[in-house]
Amino acid sequence: MRLTERQRNIIRDAGMRHFGVVPHLFGSRLDDIGRGGDIDLFIPGDWSPEDAVPRRLRFCAELRRCLGDQKIDVVVENQLSSSIQNKAKQQGVPV
């Protein structure tokens, strides 16, 4: 996992604060020998859009404030299955 301990703590704390869960990392940052790449995060649970959207916005704003201007993608689990959601569920590792 190519995140520093500081980054992991920030992401974990923000996930708990905004969603009550530990976010999962998936995608290119799981490859320890890779370089670059955005931070792909998955929020497990069964979230309605009305609940997920404002939480996701606050979560992303906090991460940007604390981690700086990095490309961060956040997928929030819901009942509408998608290929990216399925990939995140299969690959995701708690931060």
Image (spheres, grey):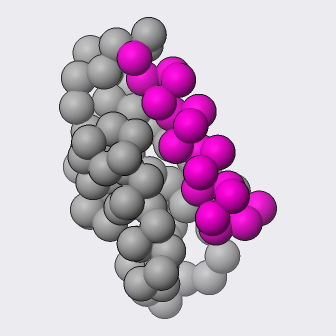
User: Residue 17 at what x, y percent from top left?
Assistant: 36, 47
Q: Quadrant of the N terminus?
A: bottom left
Residue 22 placement, left or right of 67: left
Residue 57 colored magenta? yes
Which secondary structure dominates the residues rendered in magenta?
helix
- Residue at 31% x, 50% y is 16
User: Residue 92 at what x, y percent from top left?
Assistant: 29, 56
- Residue at 59% x, 51% y is 62
Residue 80 placement, left or right of 58: left
Q: Is residue 69 above or below residue 86?
A: below
Q: Is residue 86 above or below residue 14?
A: above
| Nearer to me, 31 or 44 | 44
User: Residue 47 at what x, y percent from top left?
Assistant: 30, 21
Q: Is residue 27 above or below residue 85?
A: below
Q: Which residues are magenta?
A: 51-69
Q: Quadrant of residue 32?
A: bottom left
Residue 93 in view in this figure: yes
- Residue at 33% x, 38% y is 19
Question: In the orientation shown, which residue stands out farthest toward the bottom?
Answer: 33
Residue 72 colored magenta? no
Question: In the orientation shown, which residue stands out farthest toward the right?
Answer: 69
Q: Quadrant of the C terminus?
A: bottom left
